[in-house]
Image (cartoon, grey):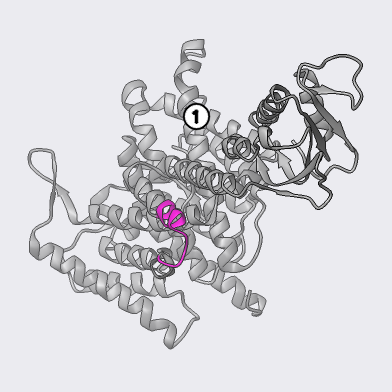
Amino acid sequence: MQDISLPARIKTEVLAGLTVSLALVPEAVAFAFVAGVPPLVGLYAAFIVGLVTSLFGGRPGMISGATGALAVVMVSLVKDHGLEFLFITVILMGIIQIGVGLLRQGKLIRMVPYPVMLGFVNGLAIVIFLSQLESFKTEGEDGHEKWLPVGDIALMLGLVAVTMLVIYVLPRFTRRVPAALAGIVVVSVVVIFGNVNTPTVGDLSSISGGLPTFGVPDVPFTFETFRIIVPFALILAGIGLIESLLTSSLIDGITETKGNNNRECVAQGSANVITGFFGGMGGCAMIGQSMINIKSGARWRLSGMVAAVLLLAYILSLSSLIEQVPIAALVGVMFVVVIGTFSWSSLRIVRKVPVSDAIVMVTVSAVTVATDLAIAVVVGVILSALVFAWNTARSIYVEASAESTPTRRVYTLHGQLFFASVTAFKDLFHPPHDPVEVVLDFRHSRVWDHSGIEAIVAVAERYERAGKQLHLLHLSENCQRILNKAGAIVDSDPGNDPAYRVTVSELSGSSGGH
């Protein structure tokens, strides 16, 4: 982080928070509509979740609030069971997230490969872009959405272009004011004082309201209620954590700092528990607003706190002013976020990386756009795991040692022995062509699962049927115990006929493992 004076840092944080707060309003209202709940339910969630995570979260500078990824899951719950069931579900969602953090499972985000991360970023950029297109639509007389008249769309696009121009040009002259905030102010002044007829925040819905009030969700506390909310709570908790931890990782890379994932899980869960009791729809990290915040120079917790407090101020007393902000200005800011979020370098390297990585990137992006982030990440991780298993399975081989004699052959195994490589492992051995004593050295190999154990037993059976003896060297103690339970291991000088003639020697000093 650039070294600047304390007053300058505070100013940067406050202005960044102001910019983010303006961008939060239409997003929170829009996501509330998506979920089928009143606008204030989305605004309260943005305020409470944003404030709690800014104060106690594990990633300073990250902005949290009501998100579309969660809203699309909430639709059927609200439609079928009502708003109160949403609140109790959000509370349970928060409890689950707290549990994940306390069990220190935030580290599971390490399992997400880099191609999946690129696919996530690109897919989310596309989703943010597509969501902004809704601002160019209106509700028709038949109740269905339709595009605005061509003239209105052209006017909005012009204002969007002016906003983006200010954002890109202003930093060449000064960085004392966040460019995104300047773009919003310039276009707002043009629209208000020029009496330009274009959609504003107030056209979405009034954001005026009072303080959120505490209340226990009015639902029957029965097993049936529990059965209804648990599946939704698990899905929402998973989506929220995945989106938050991936956004945190993205900010880590931009700021070259390290967040605390477990702390973020606990903070996000606590925020959702609180917002559920205060009439909010819950939330998680918002990559668009987080990028606005970081690009505006914010690095501390202060910017998120300022954004949350200002959002509450808009609800309580400044709604008439904020409702005059043109939607086009906020769309322009989000378009800049889209351009900055999309990993354009991935388009250049797609032909240079392995085909499998390119497929994973494209697949994750497509699934993110078509379904939701959680499914996309799970699909990406599974694809990456399958590719890794396939490639690893092909790299197993044996080499004959110089210690081999006409009556005794020593093989050194290289590679990983697990479910995907057992077929290749079995094909490496030809008992009829080997001498009466064969030694298989595992010093450069690992046995990872039960499939690998069974493969060893199968090879041992083949040597037994051929009337030959198989010795295993440097096999891990854990693997030895499993083989022993299977009745496949005998002593080097057994006193009776074994089920399979397999002997294990030099167990200590093992570098192989199971």
The image shows residue 416, relative to residue 147, as above or below, that is above
Taking 275 as reference, is 365 left or right? Answer: left
Residue visible at 58% across and 64% down in the picture:
253
The image shows residue 243, relative to residue 249, as above or below, that is above
Judging by the rendered image, the residue that carries numbered circle 1 is 233
Residue visible at 47% across and 32% down in the picture:
235
Q: Residue furthest front?
A: 406
Residues 237 and 328: in front is 237
Q: Quadrant of the N terminus?
A: bottom right
Q: Quadrant of the C terminus?
A: top right
Residue 203 shows up from this direction: yes
Residues 141 and 116: in front is 116
Indicate the quadrant where residue 442 lies: top right
In reply to whether residue 421 is colored magenta, the answer given is: no
Residue 48 shows up from this direction: no
Taking 299 as reference, is 399 left or right? Answer: right
Q: Residue furthest bottom?
A: 173
Q: Secondary structure at mark 1?
A: helix
Residues 297 and 491: in front is 491
Provide residue 445's location: percent of width, then percent of height.
73, 45
Provide residue 58's location: percent of width, then percent of height.
64, 52
